[in-house]
Structure formats: C-alpha cells, structure tokens
Amino acid sequence: MRRGLVEFLSTSLCRLICPKRQDGPAQHLHLPLARQGFSYYVLARAAFRMQRVPETGNLYHHALEYLMKAQLAKRCTEAELRNFRHRLKRIWKAFKKDFPNRRLELAAFDQVVSDVDAFERLRYPGLGMLIVAGWQRPSRQVRTANDPREYLLGIQDVDRLVAKLFEVMQLSPKAVGGPLHPDAQKALEENNPVASALRT
C-alpha cells in the first residue's frame, strides 16, 4: 500500500511544472496548487488509516493550504501567496472573501480550519501534547492549566470541507486528481461521507 501511495505522490509532484513567474495574478499556479492539495488530502486519509495521527493533521494542513491558495492564485501574485506563509486561518479568511454570497455556508467550517491550523505547530513536535482524532470530531475534555496541549481532529469534517472547496471553486476533482492508484482510491473512499463528490 505504501509503495502505491509513494508512486501516487511522485506522479502528482511531476505534474507541478509551472511557467516562469509573472508580476500579475499567479493564475498559472491555480491547477498545480489544486493538484498538490488534492494529493496531500488523499495522503492524509491514508496516514489516518495507518494510525499516524500527527502526520494526518500535518498533511491535512498542507492540503487545505494548497487548495485555498489555488483559488487565491486567481487574484494574488506569487509574492502575495508567499506572504500568507502557512497561516491557515489567514488564508481561509482571504478565501472566504472571494465568495461573499456563500459567506454563512463557508463560515460553518471555521472550527474545522481552526482544528487543522493547530497542527502547524507539529512541524516541530515536542513533549506535552495530546492528539485525539476520529472519523467524527472527538469531544473536548475538561482540562486544567497544567494539562498538555490538546489537538482534536474529525476526519469526516475535513472531508466535507474539501468537498465544499471544490464545489465553490467550481473545480472537478477529476481535473486535478487524475486516475488514482487503487490504494489511494481506497484511502479516499473509506468512511468518506462525500466520496461521490471527490471521486476521480
């Protein structure tokens, strides 16, 4: 299974070939960013299947960052995209501005983005943390100031958010995902409430 996923990621990376930089909006990065985001999304689900929870959250962070930046590339320069860095909540705020008529619909996912954004800190993991993930978001426990930092993640919540991103961007997963390796397809579809909307 892991070999198949590595091949899937390698193929996706090979697609990330872009023209030279330009001063205007980085529209040439729209599809490459979306492809990379979708690749990270599938890999995050595969990591969860292998019970690699910290890696799952970190890969989801990459996935959402790339997918949202794919939209922002339509109006932002490359320099402006870089200035967002990895600040997912800031990127999300900018993303929602592109869809004023769907503001409330997208705001329903604010907590999901906040949950995934917290995993950015795990790029450099240390002691004193509690990571809890499930297909549904676990309940937050009553805690004291001396308890380790808590990270919560609901896999199906992220699934619904990713499907919503593709929907509002009017982008088809088939256009960015291509034919998936069978192992990647299994990772995408397992317990996924929106699998039909994300199938390639």
Image: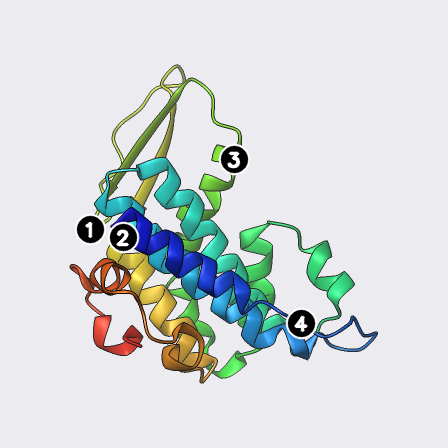
Mark 3 vs 2, N-terminal side? 3
Residue 186 point in image, percent of width and height: 20, 61
Q: Going by the picture, which residue comes out furthest to the left?
A: 191
Indicate which label's residue lies in the foreground, 3 or 4. Answer: 4
Indicate left or right for 127 with 88 as reference. left
Mark 2 vs 1, N-terminal side? 1
Q: Is residue 170 above or below residue 137?
A: below
Q: Which residue is painted at 74% across and 66% down in the image?
A: 78
* Residue 102 disc label: none
* Residue 18 disc label: 4
Task: Check contact, mark 1 vs mark 4: CB within 8 A.
Answer: no
Q: Going by the picture, which residue comes out furthest to the right?
A: 23
Indicate which label's residue lies in the foreground, 3 or 2. Answer: 3
* Residue nearest the observer in this picture, 106 or 198: 198
Q: Which residue is painted at 46% across and 50% down in the image?
A: 61
Residue 33 point in image, percent of width and height: 56, 67
Looking at the picture, which amino acid does disc 4 mark? Cys
The local secondary structure at tag 4 comes to: loop
Q: Which residue is painted at 48% across and 47% down in the image?
A: 117
Q: Is residue 122 above or below residue 106?
A: above
Q: Is residue 107 above or below residue 25?
A: above
Q: Residue under circle 3?
A: 123
**Marks 1/4: CA–CA distance:** 36 Å
Q: Residues within 10 Å of mark 3 (few under 14, many from 20)?
A: few
The local secondary structure at tag 1 comes to: loop
Task: Check contact, mark 2 vs mark 1: CB within 8 A.
Answer: yes
* Residue 135 disc label: 1
Mark 1 vs 3, N-terminal side? 3
Indicate which label's residue lies in the foreground, 1 or 4. Answer: 4
Mark 3 vs 4, N-terminal side? 4
Residue 24 point in image, percent of width and height: 80, 78
Q: Residue under circle 2?
A: 155
